[in-house]
Amino acid sequence: MNKEISELRQDPVSGDWVIISTGRAKRPESFKSRHVAASETPINLCPFENPQEHGNTIIKTYGAGDHGWAVQAVKNKFPIVSGENCGFEKRIGPYAKNDAAGHHEVVIFKDHRKSLAQLKTADVGLITGVFKERYLELEKLPCVNYILIMLNHGREAGASISHPHAQIMALPFTPSDIRRSLEGSKKYQAERGRCVHCDILAWELKEKKRIVFENDYFAALVPYAPKFSYEVRIFPKKHSSYFEEVGGNELNNFAEALRVSLAKIYNGLNNPSYNFFIHTPPVERDHEYDYYHWHLEINPRLGVWGGFELGTGGDVIDVDPDEAAEFLRSIKI
């Protein structure tokens, strides 16, 4: 690829075009100097160090260990969605509104100073198991159409509390990004008779250029057309539509792929802010999503959107995805 000429790349799922502008490429060291995680909240002021003492409603405690718990699921004290009044929609002229019904939980990890990137695979395995259990419980509740599992790490990623934690939101609607991903996957299968993500995985595992890590069940890769520099996506190698159906040794392999990917980003880019979230189909048991392939996306927050991104909804990537993957592969953890 000519470093002086920008390249357009299209995401085969969403159809979005991304500009790979390597003419203004930055070395990983330039990201290191500018992007670091949020400053630590003092332990004595941290509301997640002893959740009960700070008025958090405990849903369930997991693990034991020296401190009596390893992970806690609590109700969010300041929920984005709450309640079960989801059956009434009010029209006001051309507009529609409804109560922001749903359920919002926080999954708190015990160690105040260690993010997932610094934990052992077994510890991450416990956490991903909690994600699955909470999903299965939340999907039974009223007003739940989609369940979002996400983690914000660092100030630039929106984390207001530095103590490591994830969030789970059971929403009364399917978010637009998920709808577009579902529609793109369905269209690809209708046109070609195959899962788009299975085709992507087959190509990437053959080429090896953008693979960051793989084990028996999962592959972590930098997308061909990423939306963020050093973005990593983790896919089950075998076609699987629903995150909540992963289990046994597969869940352990997922935890390993997640830990390794985060550790490489942590060590290689000096603990940058990032978001990760799981993309899985909506909670609709009367609808089949066999054409979809669940996955987890890790988005390092290394840049700021400018006028082009805001005006077009498109993305400009400073780092060639092949080089980003090569760099992350090289990072020792």
Image (cartoon, grey):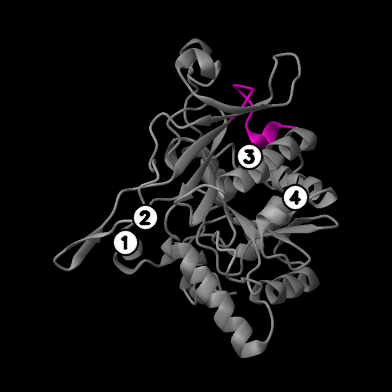
- The amino acid type found where label 1 is placed reads Leu
Residue with the mark numbered 2 = 305
- The amino acid type found where label 3 is placed reads Tyr
Residue with the mark numbered 3 = 266
**Is 276 in front, or is 331?**
276
Name the image quarter holding residue 225: bottom right
Mark 1 or mark 4, which is nearer the start of the sequence?
4
Q: Where residue 115 is drawn, which disc sits there? A: none
Query: Spatial distance from mark 1 to mark 2, Cα to Cα?
Result: 7 Å
Give how far across and how far down residue 266 sits, in percent: 63, 39
Residue with the mark numbered 4 = 254
Query: Spatial distance from mark 1 to mark 3, Cα to Cα?
Result: 28 Å
- The amino acid type found where label 2 is placed reads Trp
**Is 43 in front, or is 69?**
69
Residue with the mark numbered 1 = 310
Label 3 crowding class (10 Å Cα cut-off): few <14, some 14-19, many 20+?
Answer: many
